Amino acid sequence: MRQVVLDTETTGLEVEKNHRVIEIGCVELVNRRITGQKFHRYLNPDRDIDKGAQEVHGITRERLKKEPRFADVQAEFADFIRGAELIIHNATFDIAFLNAELRRLPGGAGIITEHCTVLDTLVLARSMHPGQRNSLDALCKRYAIDNSHRDYHGALLDARILAEVYLAMTGGQAILTLSAEADSEVSRARRQDSVSGKIKPRIPVVAASDEELALHECVLRALDKASRGKTVWRM
């Protein structure tokens, strides 16, 4: 399963006022693992940046003068996201801006959902934590994701943070590690005792509470909706 965690920065908040995308950051996940593959571009918007937006991301128009325009990177961007599930926090915002950029291209280039599906982690978070704050910063705090290095919003940095948040929200990322004790004489002796029956390990069974089961069902319903009923656990 290939997923792409995506974030953008823009010249302002209103796509209807012809505000533009000035940064795209994407991080690839394959089978719930961060692969290290990414797509990251700054873009020349050919217009001023609102003061409020600049205070959020710290990007100036002067900084972008020599950067490519969206039309120059569109093909590479489309290749990177094609066929993947996009994971975006507050997807309505980013998708609206990206679709507006695609519509400006000569002849048009369709819309984002013609290339891939979209999972909105804000919708998912609200279903899991109703009535609570579900901004990216709030989710970092809730799931103990370190974002202390985030002085400004940046598309690639926020995509990396969101990837960690998404994995934590949906069950964590399984990582196989080998400790220093793994090949020690003590650990080998323990394994031999276990095989010979000298040690009978106790395996605790912890049943989920009614509240945990209800929250789990909320997550499943949100994922069902995002995947349009194609989740394997419902088949």
Image (cartoon, rainbow, N blue to C red):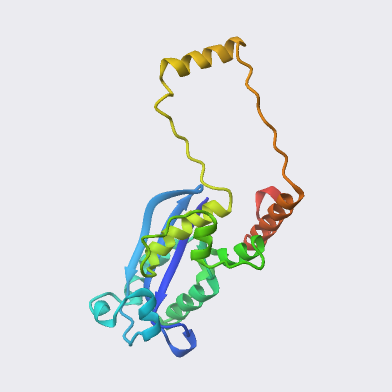
53 horizontally vs 66: left or right: right
Residue 81, image quadrant: bottom left
Vertical placement of 118 versus 13: above or below?
A: above
Q: Quadrant of residue 50?
A: bottom left
Query: 171 or 109, which is in the foreground?
Result: 171
Q: Residue at x 68, y 55 (%)?
A: 220
Q: At x 38% / y 64%, what residue is drawn?
A: 150
Q: Position of residue 13 (x, y in %)?
A: 46, 82
Q: Seen in the image, is 127 located left or right of residue 175? A: right
Left or right, 136 with reference to 199? left
Q: Residue at x 53, y 70 (%)?
A: 91
Q: Is residue 199 shown to the viewer in this render?
A: yes
At which x and y percent is residue 201? 62, 21
Q: Residue at x 42, y 15 (%)?
A: 185
- Residue 26 falls in which quadrant of the image? bottom left
Which of 65/79 is in front? 65
